[in-house]
Image (tube, rainbow, N blue to C red):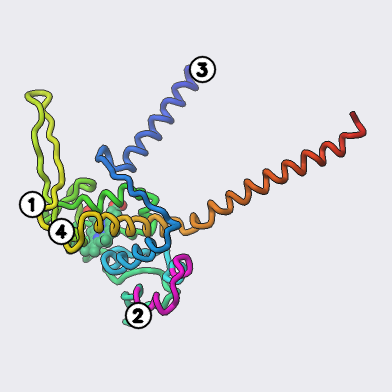
Amino acid sequence: MKKFIASVMFALSASVMTTAAMASGGGVHLEHADVDIHNKASLQRGVKYYVNYCMGCHSLGFSRYNRIAQDLGLTDEQVAKNLIFTRDANGELQKSGALMKNGISQKDSAEWFGAPPPDLTLVGRSRGPDWIYSYLKAFYVDPSRPMGVNNTVFPNVGMPHVLWELQGFQEKECTKEGEGEHAAEHCELKLTKAGSMTPSEYDQTVRDLTNFLAYVGEPAALNRKMYGVFVLLFLGLFAVIAYFLKKEYWKDVH
Ligand code: HEC
């Protein structure tokens, strides 16, 4: 019986480990995104970059403009002016209560890019912030690909390097280390053509975008943890009251 339990435990932990490895990008080294969903300024910059650079292809179909406005402290006017660029079926600009869908056709885009751009509402949870952060920094020039770029975190990705104006272009440089059987290739991405931002400014931009995607995957997380603290405080206080109540009731028995 003990053996059986041990083997079940082993199988379970092995499967948990492989799922974690798959979610983390299959062996590629991921950089730590270091995001903070309570940093409102970062989220506000993130949503602005998102609607400008990503929304054309990737909808956020489980999120509404006004929910984001409320959580990020934006006024209706700011939302209308800075966030809403997509039109509804009648050709009118979307209303602030609308779901953040775009007009791109899944069929056409699958032909253009080889794969349709997925909805990104939940990507912060399925891929995790470190993956997204590393992915947006991992585009490099590869003339053999249809879009002229490839990605070390997501090899042969169909997405073009949409942030190239900001980051510039990177190239992959590989050096061989060791001899014979022990030879290993070590590759690095080098910035060969500068963009409008310095590398650290670009990192911050990508961090803001990642932060926004982490937030939008679970907006309730903004409040959930605070409730947790209150619940623990209440339980702590109640334990003291319960203890004295118990003492009072049992006073005559002992
Ligand atoms: C021109 C269209 C286009 C734009 C603009 C675009 N993407 Fe993409 N993106 C794609 C396509 C196509 C894929 C799917 C690639 C594939 O499966 O090969 C993709 C995939 C992704 C994925 C991986 C999703 C997954 O889990 O597989 C992420 C994350 C992503 N994009 C983030 C972004 C962000 C952030 C922006 C804005 C900075 C952006 N994309 C802008 C076309 C686009």
- Identify the residue at image location x=15%, y=43%: 188
Residue range corresponding to the magenta coloring: 69-82
State the image coordinates of residue 21 (x, y, percent, origin top left). Answer: 33, 37
State the image coordinates of residue 231 (x, y, percent, origin top left). Answer: 63, 49
Q: Quadrant of residue 60?
A: bottom left
For ligand 1, the image quadrant comes to bottom left
Residue count near mark 1 (Cα–Cα under 10 Å), binned few <14, some 14–19, many ≥20: few
Task: For ligand 1, tell me if the residue under mark 4 lies within 8 Å.
Answer: no
- Magenta-highlighted stretch: main secondary structure? helix
Residue at label 1?
Answer: 144
| Helix, strand or loop under label 3 | helix
User: Closer to the camera, 115 or 151?
Assistant: 151
Q: Which mark is residue 2?
A: 3
Q: CA distance from mark 1 to mark 3?
A: 55 Å
Location of the C terminus by quadrant is top right
Residue at label 4?
Answer: 168
Nearer the observer: mark 1 or 3; the answer is 1
Q: Which is more N-terminal, label 3 or label 1?
A: 3
Q: Quadrant of residue 196?
A: bottom left
Q: Are marks 1 and 2 in contact (CB under 8 Å)?
A: no
Residue count near mark 2 (Cα–Cα under 10 Å), binned few <14, some 14–19, many ≥20: few
**Callout 1 amino acid:** Ser
**Callout 4 amino acid:** Gly
Instruction: Name above or below for residue 11 compared with residue 114.
Output: above
Q: Which mark is residue 56?
A: none
User: Closer to the camera, 7 or 154?
Assistant: 154
Q: Is residue 170 magenta?
A: no
